[in-house]
Amino acid sequence: MSFSKMVEILKKKEKNKIVFIECGAFYLAMGEDAIFLHEKFEFKCTCFLENVCKIGIPINSLEKYIRKLDDMHYAYVVYDFDKEESKLRIKYISKGKYHNIEEKSINCLTCKGTSKYKEDKYLEAVTKLLEENGYAVKG
């Protein structure tokens, strides 16, 4: 099973919570959780999968943001992942309100820029239209 499939299953299980999963030196949040955290804390979003954003919180900064989520009364669950034992462990869990963001990405065209899609005539056309109407599009 891939990491993305594990995230998908955990998001379904914890549908009313922000889900963080340990991955290396970071705790990751994906999809609508990443967008919410980006808006609240100005985390930089990057692509996890096409049209699915992710944010990463360094392990040593996690507690700072958990306290902020507690202060705002948001629900979350934090999982530690033990690679050696292939086991997940709940590190923190909090019941509270859930954010109402449903988008899984900010916009891959805006995030990655148009140069990623330079061979796509359809995206070239929409890029030209947006630029003509005063929207900045990364190149």
Image: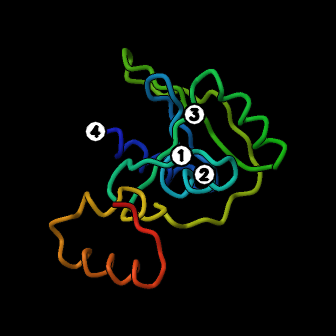
Residue at x-position 50% and y-position 29%: 22
- x%, y% of residue 128? 32, 79
Quadrant where the C terminus sits is: bottom left
Quadrant where the N terminus sits is: top left
Earlier residue among tags 4 and 3: 4
Do the residues under discs 2 and 3 have CB atoms within 8 angstroms? no
Earlier residue among tags 2 and 1: 2
Gap between marks 4 and 1 measured at Cα:
27 Å
Q: Could you tell me which secondary element the residue under label 1 belongs to?
A: loop
Gap between marks 4 and 3 measured at Cα:
24 Å
Q: Is residue 10 above or below residue 12?
A: above
Amino acid found under the numbered disc labelled 4 = Met
Q: Could you tell me which secondary element the residue under label 4 belongs to?
A: loop
Earlier residue among tags 2 and 3: 2
- Reading the image, the residue beneath label 3 is 57
Numbered mark located on residue 1 in the image: 4
Residue at x-position 20% and y-position 64%: 118
- Reading the image, the residue beneath label 2 is 38
- Reading the image, the residue beneath label 1 is 44
On screen, residue 39 versus residue 109, left or right, reads right
Disc number lying in front (4 or 1): 1
Amino acid found under the numbered disc labelled 2 = His
Disc number lying in front (1 or 3): 1
Amino acid found under the numbered disc labelled 1 = Lys
